[in-house]
Image (cartoon, rainbow, N blue to C red):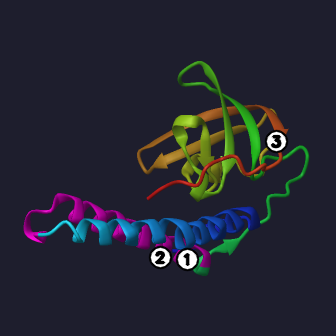
Amino acid sequence: MHNELTKKDIQKMEEEIEYRKVVVRKEAIEAVKEARAQGDLSENFEYYAAKRDKNKNESRIRYLERMIKTAVVVSDDSKEDEIGLNNTIRIYIEEDDEEQEIKLVTTVRGNSIKGLISIESPMGKALLGHKVGDRVTIRVNDSYSYDVIVRSIENTIDDGTDQLREY
């Protein structure tokens, strides 16, 4: 698992880890203690819910630490006239006869519903390095592909407001 991440992604992950270790972990341990003090654990739903929340937090910490440890750091710099990471792109999808605006992001920020497309997805991989006016074939799998035309490229600055995806 070698996810491509920017320095800003890693910084955001480290901040989340710190918050989870200092704040969330302390709250979760306290919730478990309070639930345990209520008596019989065999029928204590609050205890099991508190343990589940504590374990979920610890799992998220381990996941983020593993992502950072195995990450390949990529630059979010790109040429002004080429599609690169953190660029907002307007594409024309010929098959659907519609335009769509997307932003290419790293995997941990990908959210296709919000138009945030991972550079590791079929569309992200296909679009990287192309220019306005290029016809790009997006190969979804061996039996299906479609063409898009790049209409515009806007170099956007990663301001860190795109949320990291929860797993």
Residue visible at 69% across and 31% down?
Answer: 91
Residue on which the image places disc 2: 62
Return the residue found at the far bottom.
Answer: 69
Disc 2 element: helix
- Circles 2 and 1: CB atoms closer than 8 Å: yes
The CA distance from mark 2 to mark 3 is 39 Å
30 sits left or right of 118 in the view? left
Q: 122 or 106: nearer the eye?
A: 106
Work out which quarter of the rendered image holds the C terminus and state it.
bottom left
| Residue 165 lies in the magenta-colored region | no
Q: Which residue is mark 3?
A: 131
Q: Amino acid at mark 2?
A: Arg
| Residue 84 located left or right of residue 99 | right
User: From which residue to which does the magenta span run?
Assistant: 40-68
Q: In terms of secondary structure, what is the magenta stretch mainly?
A: helix
- The answer to whether mark 1 and mark 3 are in CB contact below 8 A is no
